[in-house]
Image: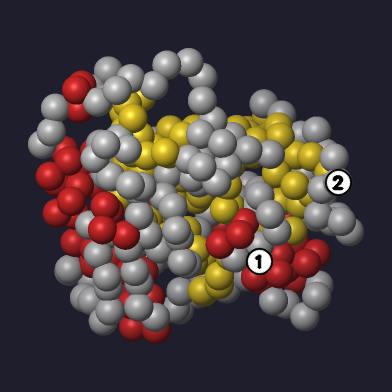
């Protein structure tokens, strides 16, 4: 299934795409795509229903992040071997973990705000994992049983905030609009090869990132198991699993986003996003 949330910011409704990719209003089934609605048993029940009996959503609508009430957006740094190589940093022996403030989360087609004082605004396409069942001290073998689905995260980053201001990554990762999610939450049954998904990102129509999850250093099950040792993962928590090579800071010379730039990105089976960079005060 492909789950979505549609409507104006703050008042989104739950939706679902039927077999013909027609958007249906799912608010008669669930209050929102959060907590209990994301439990694997709940999703299995919904998948057995006749979705074409749900009301059709006509016309163009804004899509929000496909999950609501997200407590934690957890980032994983340098999780692609070829990305670590382009940065000149050593291959991590354990996952590098940071948090993005939940207030940075937005829809897949919302604007990216360039913060005041920003000089190194960068892009990162990432596979995101959404937790559906509480996970604490889970094994790698059982980790995927705790997954509600997968989506795209654009891990927008301000590198000067990230690296030059006492090295605290969260500061460079959490501005408003730095966490576009979506367009869909895709349930695991639709992902046929999690370890070999293609990822891409363009800036103004020029390809900047091309990668595959086959290059991930720590797999999705490994990340879930590892994180569940240091924090409890709750339904709706999102894990952004790292980015392939081609980020702006890794180019020679480095290249960064500016106001007016258009970023498009996608992951095999998970859809596409598009954002325009705008000044924070515009």
Give the residue at mark 1. 88
The chosen color scheme is secondary structure
CA separation, marks 1 and 2?
35 Å
Number of on-image labels: 2
Placement of the N terminus among the 4 image quadrants: top left
Residue 103 in the figure: left or right of residue 185: right
Q: Secondary structure at mark 2?
A: loop
Q: Position of residue 128 (x, y in %)?
A: 43, 53
Could you say which quadrant of the image residue 263 lies in? top right
Q: In the rendering, at what x and y percent does residue 56 appear?
A: 33, 20
Q: In this view of the protein, can residue 201 be seen by the observer?
A: no
Left or right position of 68 against 49: right
Label 1–label 2 contact, CB within 8 A: no
Note whether 167 is above or below 130 in the view shown: below
Q: Earlier in the sequence, mark 1 or mark 2?
A: 1
**Mark 1 residue crowding within 10 angstroms, few (<14) / some (14–19) / many (20+):** few
- Kindly identify the residue that appears in the image at 77 percent across and 44 percent down: 257
Residue at 34% from the left image edge and 83% from the top image edge: 229
Residue 236 drawn at (x, y percent):
37, 59
Q: Residue at x 58, y 65 (%)?
A: 100
Q: Nearer the viewer, residue 134 or 205?
A: 134
Residue linked to disc 2: 281
Give the image location of residue 276, x and y in percent. 71, 34
Q: Is residue 14 left or right of residue 114?
A: left
Q: Secondary structure at mark 1?
A: loop
Residue 94: name its quadrant.
Answer: bottom left
Q: Is residue 92 above or below residue 86?
A: below
From this viewpoint, which residue is outermost toward the right? 117
Residue 148, which numbered label? none
């Amino acid at each position: 299934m492909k789950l979505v949330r549609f409507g104006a910011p703050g008042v989104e409704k739950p939706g679902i795409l039927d077999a013909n990719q027609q958007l249906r209003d799912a608010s008669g089934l669930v209050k929102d795509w959060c907590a209990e609605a994301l439990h694997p048993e709940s999703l299995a029940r919904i998948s057995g229903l006749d979705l074409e009996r749900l009301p059709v959503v006509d016309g163009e609508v804004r899509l929000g992040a496909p999950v609501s009430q997200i407590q934690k957006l957890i980032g994983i740094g340098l999780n692609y071997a070829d990305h670590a190589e382009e940065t000149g940093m050593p291959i991590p022996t354990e996952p590098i973990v940071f948090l993005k403030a939940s207030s940075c989360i937005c829809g897949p087609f919302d604007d990216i705000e360039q913060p005041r004082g920003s000089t190194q605004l960068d892009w990162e396409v990432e596979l995101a994992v959404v937790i559906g069942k509480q996970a604490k001290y889970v094994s790698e073998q059982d980790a995927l049983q705790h997954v509600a689905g997968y989506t795209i995260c654009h891990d927008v980053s301000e590198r000067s905030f990230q690296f030059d201001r006492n090295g605290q990554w969260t500061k460079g990762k959490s501005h408003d609009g730095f966490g576009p999610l979506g367009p869909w939450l895709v349930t695991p049954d639709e992902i046929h090869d999690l370890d070999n998904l293609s990822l891409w990102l363009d800036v103004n129509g020029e390809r900047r990132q091309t990668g595959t999850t086959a290059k991930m250093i720590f797999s999705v099950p490994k990340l879930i198991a590892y994180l569940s040792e240091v924090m409890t993962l709750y339904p709706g928590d999102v894990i952004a699993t790292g980015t392939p090579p081609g980020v702006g800071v890794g180019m020679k010379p480095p290249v960064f986003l500016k106001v007016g730039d258009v970023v498009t990105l996608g992951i095999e089976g998970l859809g596409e996003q598009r954002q325009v960079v705008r000044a924070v005060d515009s």
